[in-house]
Image: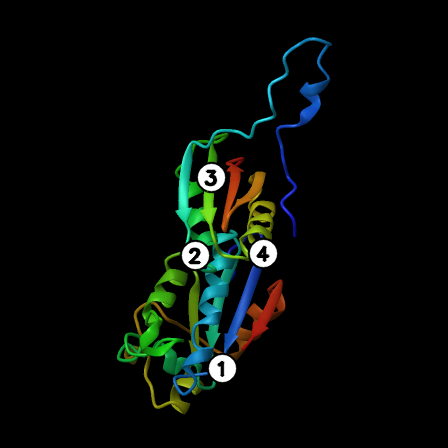
Amino acid sequence: MVATNRVAASATRTASKGDVVPEPTVPVADQVLDCRGLACPLPVVKTAQAIKTLALGQVLELLATDPGVEPDMRAWTSRTHNELLDVSKQADVFHILIRRAR
Amino acid sequence: MWAAGSEAKVLYVQTHGTADPGRSATPFFLAAAAAAMEFEAMIYFTMYGPTLLRRDVVDHIGPKGEKGQPLRYFIEQATGLGVRLLVCQPSLELNDLRLPDLIDGVEMIGGAAFNDLAVSADAVISF
């Protein structure tokens, strides 16, 4: 599975001519959860615990190296009705942004 | 025995015991992940399964032996998220165990309750 869920849509690129259009950005995380080096099911378990410490609407950034973390977090956010905002991978580290939606 | 209103209900069945440590921890992993997904999860220990819950065993075996965490770590990871652990009397007798020989919090059920849990679960996964 390839990380494709860029949320900050590029719709703003079509602003009127001559405007300076900022690069699309992903939301800034309110909290970072470092699960690098941890294996399944810990990233899921720790995300479930961490998200409850955020206010509704706030964003959690999960850092993880578990190779199964992307499908896991897609399943987890879908089932828990939280919002998966972005998945990206830098070197061996997945950066997963999740907005607490309930 | 299932709570009303959970997103989904998953019943795991563990039949393997202390003779096969490599098969000891996976039901706890999966049940912990289920609970983290706000599913309701229970693990039913039958046949040799109850031997994994012995209070004099959980600190001394683990899926990777000396190289990894003891089984207690994986059990508490699951129960800490609300996973319930179930046994029945005949499988305790099979292993010459009594409920007080097991770690705290294990619940006793019988065959009727097991079947009721199974038919009302969304999934039953047997190991």
Q: Position of residue B106 (x, y in %)?
A: 37, 71
In the rendered structure, which disc, 2 or 3, sits on the residue that comes first in sequence?
Answer: 2
Identify residue type, mark 1. Thr
B22 w.r.t. A83: above or below:
below
Residue positioned most to the left: B56
Question: Camera-side residue: A18 or B50?
Answer: A18
User: Distance between the Cα atoms at labels 3 and 1?
Assistant: 38 Å
In the rendered structure, which disc, 1 or 4, sits on the residue that comes first in sequence?
Answer: 4
Determine which of the numbered discs, if any, sits on residue B15 in the image.
Answer: 1
Q: Residues within 10 Å of mark 3 (few under 14, many from 20)?
A: many
Q: Are marks 1 and 2 in contact (CB under 8 Å)?
A: no
Q: Residues within 10 Å of mark 1 (few under 14, many from 20)?
A: some
Determine which of the numbered discs, if any, sits on residue A42 in the image.
Answer: 2
Question: Camera-side residue: B68 or A41?
Answer: B68
- The mark total stands at 4
Q: How did the renderer colour the structure?
A: rainbow
Secondary structure of residue under mark 1: loop
Q: Mark 3 or mark 1: which is in front?
A: 3
Q: Are marks 2 and 3 in contact (CB under 8 Å)?
A: no
Mark 3 on the same chain as mark 1: no
Identify residue type, mark 4. Ala
Chain letter, disc 4 residue: B
User: Distance between the Cα atoms at labels 4 and 3?
Assistant: 26 Å
Judging by the rendered image, the residue that carries numbered circle 3 is A61
Chain letter, disc 1 residue: B
Judging by the rendered image, the residue that carries numbered circle 4 is B8
Write down the quadrant of residue A51 in the picture. top left
Q: Position of residue B23 (x, y in %)?
A: 47, 78
